[in-house]
Image (cartoon, rainbow, N blue to C red):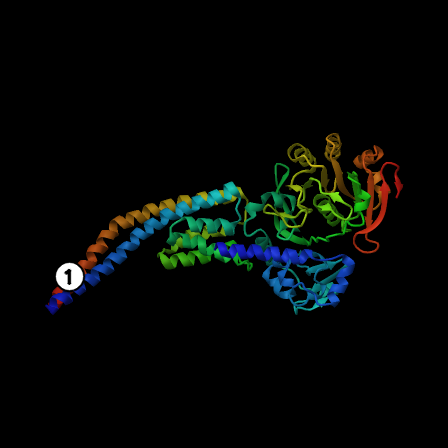
């Protein structure tokens, strides 16, 4: 009886870890989709109502999903403090907050980082160009992350349970 | 988040109120001797300085607070604070000094950070303002820029590589028009008035108070307020920041902010039917034309012009016409002889003789 309970625990635990890892893949796909939404919203704020950056970022941060919104929200809070921080520095802080919630690769961070360099310090036209470019790149990243998800998500789910089963077999 | 905002707004309002309490220039000295109620960190122009500079000046400027008219930052030059005719600077040891050579040198990064702060990191939101070379900040102060102009088909697109920043600190002196009002208002009639003044003699401050008094009404002489249309081409009179006037300009005043004077006057006449139109610094041909139009509509015009004295204005191409035509009922000349806003002469525009 006790053995059965132990085996159950091991399989359950390993399975849980597997599912957790698999979940990251879907979270990442979701993130890149929402990021594109976020950039579209930012585009509207800048283009249509010329909202200053702190307010624009704050509004975007509130409108989209929590994980992804943390990028915008954090940058907005940094800028609201008015301690002489540049938009690019504030944006980088946002990226750090985001990467703590959802793992990002170096290239993805770099992509967002490059966007930050141009943030706020040029006229409307250039801002819109910058946003459009970043959106396009995000779309491409989304596609490749989707591929990754298809390939790996199922594998990690099975791998967790199977590893658990193997451990149980060895121990028996 | 929203709460933070409300607080910030309240802060700004508070600081404006404190700033606007400033009494007549001659009384400032007295208020310094007694305990000064103003705290430098509560002033809106102080909050618009970069944190580095704020830290540098927070302790040493307190004694001149309320007197500053300009703060100038130029690349690789000392920071300069100007009060009236005196100029001073701050050393890197946070000491106030009149020896400008010892002053703290402003570097490019400082300028860049200041611009980012002033524009809230959003140059795109202030495109038009940058084209004109200045922006209005909370408190109604104006900040001017120079740098390299970027042209697009011969027109200025924006200014880049900003090398100099000038904070012009706007000040509301409630009641500074008290002496002049009797010359402008006679029973219920308001005269067409031209204010002539050299730069920095309180021309805008005076106009602001005239507008306020005419708009609110003056109980002392039994004058009921009338509708005033204000064309504030350079956002200087009302100091509008994001739609809200930062100075008291009266309860019957309609403001067209950042609008070219000639167009603005016509728009106001059509849309808001004012009794009085006030505007700053006329001089262009179109301005004169729209003043004629205002006259046709039965609207009183109160305006100002840059100039040392009456003779000088009489010689100006477009203004000459107006004066010879005897358009203005009153011509008021200001100077700096006995401090900012000295009333030099009042001339009856019909007889062209002093009153």
Up/down of B101 relative to B230, above or below = below
- Looking at the image, the residue that sits furthest to the top is B296
User: In x, y percent, where is residue A138?
Assistant: 39, 47
User: In x, y percent, where is residue B340?
Assistant: 79, 54
User: In x, y percent, where is residue A166?
Assistant: 15, 62
Q: Quadrant of the C terminus of chain B?
A: top right
Q: Would residue A60 be found to the left or right of residue A101 on screen?
A: right
Residue at 82% of width from left, 42% of height from top? B331
Q: Would residue A17 be found to the left or right of residue B270 on screen?
A: left
Disc 1: which chain? A
Up/down of B176 relative to B273, above or below = below
The answer to whether residue A91 is visible is no
- For disc 1, the neighbor class at 10 Å (few under 14, some 14 to 19, many from 20) is some
Q: Nearer the viewer, residue A81 or B277?
A: B277
Q: Quadrant of residue B95?
A: bottom right
- Count of picture labels: 1
Up/down of A138 relative to A20, above or below = above
Q: Nearer the viewer, residue B295 or B279?
A: B295
Find disc 1 in the rendering and name its residue: A165
The answer to whether residue A74 is visible is yes
Q: Would residue B150 be found to the left or right of residue B209 on screen?
A: left
């Amino acid at each position: 009886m006790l053995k059965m309970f132990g085996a159950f625990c091991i399989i359950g635990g390993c399975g849980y870890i597997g599912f957790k890892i698999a979940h990251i893949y879907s979270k990442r796909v979701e993130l890149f989709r929402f990021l594109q939404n976020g950039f579209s919203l930012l585009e509207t704020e800048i283009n249509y109502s010329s909202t200053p950056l702190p307010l624009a970022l704050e509004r975007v941060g509130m409108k989209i999903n929590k994980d992804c919104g943390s990028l915008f929200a954090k940058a907005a809070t940094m800028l609201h403090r008015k301690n002489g921080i540049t938009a690019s520095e504030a944006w980088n802080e946002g990226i750090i907050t985001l990467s703590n919630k959802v793992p990002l690769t170096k290239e993805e961070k770099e992509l967002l980082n490059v966007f930050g360099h141009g943030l706020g310090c040029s006229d409307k036209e250039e801002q819109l160009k910058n946003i459009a470019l970043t959106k396009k790149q995000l779309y491409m990243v989304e596609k490749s992350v989707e591929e990754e998800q298809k390939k790996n998500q199922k594998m990690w789910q099975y791998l967790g349970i199977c590893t658990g089963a193997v451990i149980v077999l060895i121990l028996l | 988040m929203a709460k933070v905002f409300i607080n910030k707004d309240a802060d700004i309002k508070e600081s404006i109120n404190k700033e606007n309490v400033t009494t007549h220039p001659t009384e400032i000295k007295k208020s310094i001797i007694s305990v000064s109620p103003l705290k430098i960190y509560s002033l809106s122009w102080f909050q618009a300085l970069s944190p580095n500079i704020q830290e540098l000046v927070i302790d040493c400027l307190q004694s001149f607070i309320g007197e500053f008219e300009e703060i100038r930052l130029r690349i690789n030059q000392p920071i300069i604070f100007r009060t009236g005719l005196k100029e001073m600077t701050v050393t890197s040891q946070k000491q106030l000094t009149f020896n400008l050579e010892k002053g703290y040198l402003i570097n490019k990064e400082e300028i860049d950070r200041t611009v980012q702060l002033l524009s809230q990191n959003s140059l795109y939101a202030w495109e038009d303002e940058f084209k004109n070379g200045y922006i209005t900040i909370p408190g109604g102060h104006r900040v001017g820029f120079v740098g390299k102009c970027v042209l697009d088909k011969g027109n200025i697109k924006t200014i880049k590589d900003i090398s100099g920043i000038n904070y012009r600190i706007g000040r509301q002196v409630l009641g500074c028009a008290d002496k002049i009002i009797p010359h402008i208002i006679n029973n219920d009639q308001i005269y067409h008035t031209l204010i002539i003044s050299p730069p920095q003699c309180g021309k805008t401050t005076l106009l602001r108070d005239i507008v306020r008094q005419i708009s609110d009404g003056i109980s002392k002489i039994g004058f009921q307020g009338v509708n005033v249309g204000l064309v504030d081409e350079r956002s200087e009179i009302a100091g509008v920041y994001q739609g809200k006037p930062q100075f008291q300009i009266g309860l019957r005043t309609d403001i067209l902010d950042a609008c070219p004077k000639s167009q603005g006057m016509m728009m106001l006449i059509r849309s808001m039917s004012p009794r009085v139109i006030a505007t700053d610094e006329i001089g262009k041909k179109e301005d004169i034309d729209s003043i004629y139009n205002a006259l046709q509509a039965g609207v009183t015009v109160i305006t100002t012009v840059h100039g040392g004295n009456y003779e000088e204005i009489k010689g100006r191409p477009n203004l000459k016409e107006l004066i010879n035509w005897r358009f203005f009922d009153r011509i008021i000349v200001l100077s700096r002889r006995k401090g900012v806003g000295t009333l030099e002469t009042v001339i009856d525009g019909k007889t062209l003789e002093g009153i």
